[in-house]
Each structure stands twice: as structure tokens, then as C-alpha cells.
Amino acid sequence: MSRILVAEDEPRIASFLENGLRSNGFVVTVVADGESAYQYARTGAFDLMVLDLGLPITDGLTVLRLLRAEKIDLPVVVLTARDSVADTVTGLESGADDYIRKPFGFDELLARVRLRLRGPGRAPEPTMLRAGDMTLDLRTRRILVDGGTAEVALTAREFALAEVFFRHVDQVLTREQLLSHVWGLDFDPGSNVVEVYVRYLRRKLGDTRIETLRGMGYRLHSRRRSTMEG
Ligand code: CA
């Protein structure tokens, strides 16, 4: 089991990360200031740190520089503010392994964490996900349908939504799960964006693939259903 140190001072984002990572099998410790981040990171008790740059007491960049100056090579995924290209560049130059811009969807973060945890020499993640006769190619970001004879191109958002469905074939996903996975925290929970994008996916994959379960959520079926049930 991998141990993740989360350094984030905004309680809402910290608990979003903590809950999400825990439910994916990680052991999570949260700290809310840079000094604690630095002290915890030096213990050697963690496999990766998710580091917000805007932290009180000691800012994230300083934490990162101090750790790297001590030759501590803990993988670090940095969280940067939206549009802060300078922060991102400085972060990578200061020894971050990867970065994510806020606001972010949980799946994006999870993908980065898994990638950086794996490190060199470990088995790669599968690049193809299957649902019945459909295959989602994580590299080309396309879906092959009808056993690979037809190809469907998706927009970035459609792809992100499709990926969540393909990772949970035949399972019911609630609207809230889809929102937090694909659109992240900063999205208005009253928005109908999930409905809209499910409709886009149905248009591209066929009406019967994604079922609506009223009051519960949505389900991608591995088998093609003969009738349109929702
Ligand atoms: Ca912050």
C-alpha cells in the first residue's frame, strides 16, 4: 500500500484529496502548512507527496527546494493555481516530478499519482480499457467500436467522462461521482453538465450503451442492450 503525504491548506481541497485517495487504497496523511510538509516529507515514511505551492509558514516551492537540496528524492506532484505558468515552470525546475493546475478533476490527479509512484522499471498501466465490443485507447484518446472496425473521436471532456465509465463498466455512477471525477471541485453542483455530456456520448457511442437510472445515476453496459431503456 502506498503512503501519500498531502500538503494542502484549503480544507475543502484537502478532504477531497484525502477521501479520494483513501477510497483508491492509499494511506493518506494531510498537513496544512509548509513547515509540517517539510518535516513529514523528510521522515522517509511516504512514497509520494502532493504539494500545494501556496502554503502558510513555508511556501511549497521552498519546501521542494529544501528537500531536493538534502537529496530527498520523494516523488512530488505539485498543485498550482490556474494560469500560473511561471509557478509551474519554477516548480518543475525546483524538482517537482509533475504538476496539476487547479481546479482539477480527481481522475487527473489519480493518474499523475499512479504514474509518479510507478517510477522507472515497474509494470506500465494498461493503455486499453474494454467494455464489451468497445475499446478505449488511453494513448490515442479514441474509442474503437464494433470490435475495432469503427473509430469514434471524442473531445477532451467527452473522453474524460468516457474514461470514468470504462473504468467502472456495469457499475452505477452517481452524478456527483461523475462531476467530481471529471469536472473537479469548483463546479456548480446544480449544473446539468453531466446530463449534457452523457447525451453527447450517447450520440457518439449509440443510445443504448449508457443507461440512466432515475434518481441514482448512470451505467455503462458491457453488453449492447436491444432496447432504449433510458
Ligand atoms: Ca493553498
Image: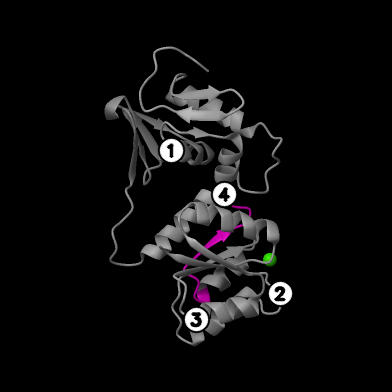
How far from the left and from the top, in percent, is residue 54?
Answer: 67, 69
Which residue is found at the position 43% from the left and 23% from the top?
A: 209
143 on left or right of 104: left
Identity of the amino acid at label 4? Gly
The answer to whether 122 is drawn above or below residue 178 in the figure is below
Q: Earlier in the sequence, mark 1 or mark 2?
A: 2
Q: Residue under circle 1?
A: 168
Q: Main secondary structure of the magenta part?
A: loop
Identity of the amino acid at label 3? Thr
Residue span colored magenta: 93-105
Identity of the amino acid at label 2? Pro
Q: CA distance from mark 4 to mark 2?
A: 24 Å
Looking at the rendered structure, which numbered label has been put on residue 43? 3
Q: CA distance from mark 3 to mark 2?
A: 20 Å
Tell me if residue 220 can be seen.
yes
How far from the left and from the top, in percent, is residue 98?
Answer: 49, 65
Q: Is there CB contact under 8 Å for labels 3 and 1?
A: no
Q: CA distance from mark 4 to mark 3?
A: 29 Å
How far from the left and from the top, in percent, is residue 146?
Answer: 31, 24
**Membership of 58 in magenta stretch:** no
Q: Earlier in the sequence, mark 4 or mark 3?
A: 3
Q: CA distance from mark 1 to mark 4?
A: 16 Å
The answer to whether 170 is drawn above or below residue 43 in the figure is above
